[in-house]
Image (cartoon, rainbow, N blue to C red):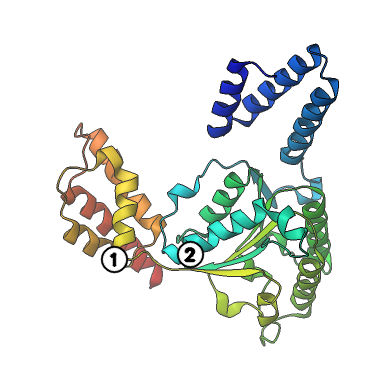
Amino acid sequence: MATADQLRTLIRSHFSDNSERFYTIALQVAAHEARQGHTALANDIREIVDKERQKHRVIPFPQDLHGLVLTENPDTKKSVLVMEPDLYDRIERVIHEYRQQHKLKSHGLKHRRKILLIGSPGTGKTMTARVLAHELRLPLHTIQVDRLVTKFMGETSAKLRQIFDLIQQEHGVYLFDEFDAIGGERSLENDVGEMRRVLNAFLQFIEQDSSDSLIVAATNNPKLLDNALFRRFDDVLFYKLPNPENRKRLIENILNIFLASRPSWKKILSESEGLSHAEIDYACRDAIKNAILNDKMKVDTSMLTLMLQERQSVHHGRKQ
């Protein structure tokens, strides 16, 4: 059996999400078992480690997809998500079903793996994709949909086919950001034949996809999406601007030790009304930087409300 020190280190590396350390210790355990004459067990451990490493290996994308796909290994934990409980529970369900997919498959059922995220900019859609990738220990591949669409006939559909080939071959979370660029309603009068072909191709590819990858599409404009798209997704999640309770939680999470004692929450929540999660995040971090540069080390109500007012002016200016 593995030594006590190896078991302790193995457990610590697992709970600290240090996968490389975990793999190293697991191989040390395999070597230890081999020296004890437990060859079959040692080989089983090595095979498990090799398979897991293969799953999490990130391969380079083909040259003709260069610049269209951004790859990262996020470290965003689900604890950073500040949202309505029902939305959080549905994200948890996606994670739980994915982790238990073999149990579901044994009963002829499929886990959720094609997810559509709908909501205003800055409400947490991209962050959700990062959380899913981190929690499932998968690489996140973000497809720049606006750059995917080209003026050359047939080229966009060809690139889509390449991406879905990769989805099949390389296990990961694939985020189609600004999805409405290709998911527009086919009956729109200003649509062109090429875009209808692209949408039809996407509908065909996503329906036929049977990979183990997680496909996430995000859009700010659900009214532009073709109705046929909604039927291709296993779940549709709607994101809203944060309510007062969530705004308070978000500000507390971001400011943390920088938050001054006894802030005026009534004033802060009033100034933050109508702002997205991302805009509040920017305001809080600007307030922290201001406090550090002025050697105050604490963010008081007046400083935070000033930064929130600045974000409000940007927010309203963008809407005009």
Q: Residue at x 70, y 53 (%)?
A: 68
Point out the frontmost of discs 1 and 2: 2
Q: Nearer the viewer, residue 121 or 217?
A: 217
Quadrant in which the N terminus appears: top right
Q: In the visual, does 241 lie left or right of 137?
A: left
* Residue indicated by mark 1: 273
Q: Residue at x 37, y 57 (%)?
A: 279
Query: Residue 118, which numbered label?
Result: none
Q: In the visual, does 291 lie left or right of 78?
A: left
Cα–Cα span, label 1 and label 2: 20 Å
Q: Secondary structure at mark 1?
A: loop
Res 159 seen here: yes
What kind of residue is marked 2? Leu
Percent of width and height locating residue 56: 71, 39
Q: Nearer the viewer, residue 27 or 204?
A: 27
Query: Residue 87, which numbered label?
Result: 2
Percent of width and height locating residue 2: 67, 19
Q: Secondary structure at mark 2?
A: helix
Badge 2: few (under 14), some or many (20 or more) residues near its Cα, within 10 Å? some
Quadrant in which the C terminus appears: bottom left
- Placement of 309 over or under 80, stated as above or below: below
What kind of residue is marked 1? Glu
Percent of width and height locating residue 210: 80, 61
